Image (spheres, rainbow, N blue to C red):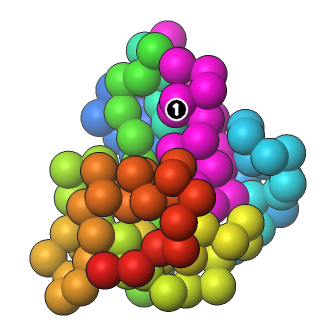
Amino acid sequence: MTLLLALACASDPNAPPVVHYDLDACADCGMLVSDPAYASAIVTKDGKTLAFDDPGCLFHYMVTKLPDVRGMWFHDGAADHWLRESEVGFVPGSTSPMGSGLKPAPVATPGALSVGEASSQVLSGKPVSK
């Protein structure tokens, strides 16, 4: 049954990624993806999942590696489900694994930064704030 579910998710291009916590390494920094509250992932056009331990790592990877992306996903920091790029905002001020200070949350969360705002602040090296 589990195998069938995994195969079904793998064949659905709109399905959230499968990240194996404490086993998958961050595609950017190499640390293990351990805290679901900060996990993020890129699904490439060829269906490969790239896991990240911090949203800042995903943003860095996007500009340095220029992957062919089908979708970006962020794990909701307060609930056990994934948010698509269009559904996510980032609450600043958190103690995240690699120090970006960003915690994924639903886009309508008060004070949340957009993907563009969060990415710009992380990549500029400035402290993340609203």
- Tell me the magenta residue range: 46-67
72 up-or-down from 91: above or below: above
71 up-or-down from 126: above or below: above
Q: Nearer the viewer, residue 8 or 13?
A: 13
Name the residue rendered at 62%, 22% in the picture: 65
In the image, is 61 to the left or to the right of 80? right
Give percent across and percent down for residue 46: 49, 11
Name the residue rendered at 63%, 50% in the picture: 57
Label 1 Cα neighbours within 10 Å, binned few <14 / some 14-19 / many ≥20 = some
Give percent across and percent down for residue 37: 55, 76
Give percent across and percent down for residue 118: 38, 60
Would you name the residue on which mark 1 appears?
62
Asked if the magenta segment contains residue 55, the reply would be yes
Q: Nearer the viewer, residue 6 or 124?
A: 124
Q: Quadrant of residue 55?
A: bottom right
Q: Nearer the viewer, residue 90 or 78?
A: 90
129 up-or-down from 100: above or below: below
Q: Is residue 84 visible?
A: no
Give percent across and percent down for residue 60: 59, 41
Asked if the magenta segment contains residue 24, the reply would be no
Q: Is residue 124 visible?
A: yes
73 up-or-down from 14: above or below: below
- Quadrant containing the C terminus is bottom left
In the image, is 73 to the left or to the right of 111? right
Going by the picture, which residue comes out furthest to the left?
A: 108
Name the residue rendered at 73%, 38% in the picture: 27
Name the residue rendered at 40%, 79% in the picture: 129
Residue type at tag 1: Met
In the image, is 70 to the left or to the right of 56? left
Instruction: Determine the secondary structure under disc 1.
Output: helix
Q: How many marks?
A: 1
Q: Quadrant of residue 83?
A: bottom left
